[in-house]
Amino acid sequence: MAKGQVQAVAAFSRYITFDRERWKALRASTPLLLSEEDLVSLRGINDQVSLSEVSDIYVPLSRLLNLHFAAVQHLYEARQQFLGTTVPRRVPYIIGIAGSVAVGKSTFARVLRASLARWPEHRKVDLITTDGFLYPNAMLEARGLMNRKGFPESYDQRLLLQFLSDLKAGAPAVCAPVYSHLHYDIVAGAVARVEQPDILILEGLNVLQSPREGGSRLFVSDFFDFSIYMDSDDQTIEIWYIERFLRLRETVFRNKDSYFHRYSQLSESEAIQTARRIWEEINLPNLRDNIGPTKERAQLILEKGTNHRVDNILLGRL
């Protein structure tokens, strides 16, 4: 192959890249649907999303997703016409959100949910996290997986696939297990009931993960209508993880019922050392080996800078 041909192949990308200003312009005339008061209850403990971030990033994204939602509804109607189905079937539009621990997925998912629910075409928007599909601690301990919590093998993939399959089959109600971050475990007997939402957002570390060899040939992402990956460099996410750990040490960890209450007694230097060790031994290997390699399976990649702002947006080509 000629030198010029090699360079052409290397330069190829299936994404269209936007900087913040170009993406902001795609908002068109879409109004800002959230207020500063709305954001107070949606912000994460270490991800202080601003109203300008909502205006510049979330509003154009909600416009894009609203257009996609409408297009998919037309596809469903065409399929029903082809099949001769006269009874309409409510099937949720499913959005998957993936990315590392501490990259800001939870806050992003909550703000996106609130933004999408303001559109008249899809008032009912539900949010489910894959934490509820982790195996209970007792089972993880029995299998020697407590130090691999959050890795693909720590999830009940079969249960998650069944949950999504039932949703896409139009089931009137589907239940998901509930996870307690305070107790760091599944809440026995508790369920989150999902009743035919217009849109379902599924947020989790490994939602774009391929099945393990010898496992199901069905992907979780096979059920997605749209997928988003939250990205930043490893060193930046490590800093955010340590900052979040220090904030939790001063807040949630002080609760005597917290699974991590013991960490509230650490000095600041001890807490930093502990957080860095957990990051290097657990979260970084999971990011590099499992989460990061799935990035380019997403239809949209949001690249965040050190100040938590989204600086670049990569939109997959159709």
Image (cartoon, rainbow, N blue to C red):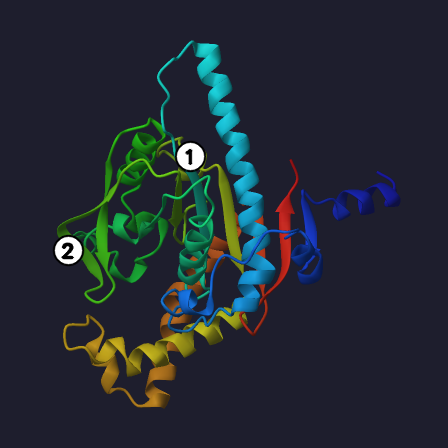
Question: What is the crowding at mark 2: few (fewer than 14 residues within 10 Å), some, or many (at least 20)?
Answer: few
Between the residue at mark 2 and the residue at mark 1, the CA separation in whole angstroms equals 30 Å
- Residue 296: tell me if it is visible: no
- Badge 1 local density, few (<14 within 10 Å), some, or many (20+)? some
Residue at position x 46%, y 73% in the image: 240
Quick check: 296 above or below 309? above
Secondary-structure class at tag 1:
helix
**Does dot 2 land on a helix, a strand or a loop?**
helix
Q: Is residue 219 above or below residue 99?
A: above
Q: Left or right of 225: which side holds 4? A: right
Against 251, residue 97 (above or below) is above
Going by the numbered disc 2, the residue's amino acid type is Ala
Q: Amino acid at mark 1?
A: Phe
| Dot 2 and dot 1 residues touching (CB under 8 Å) | no
- Mark yes or no: residue 258 visible: yes
The residue wearing badge 1 is 223
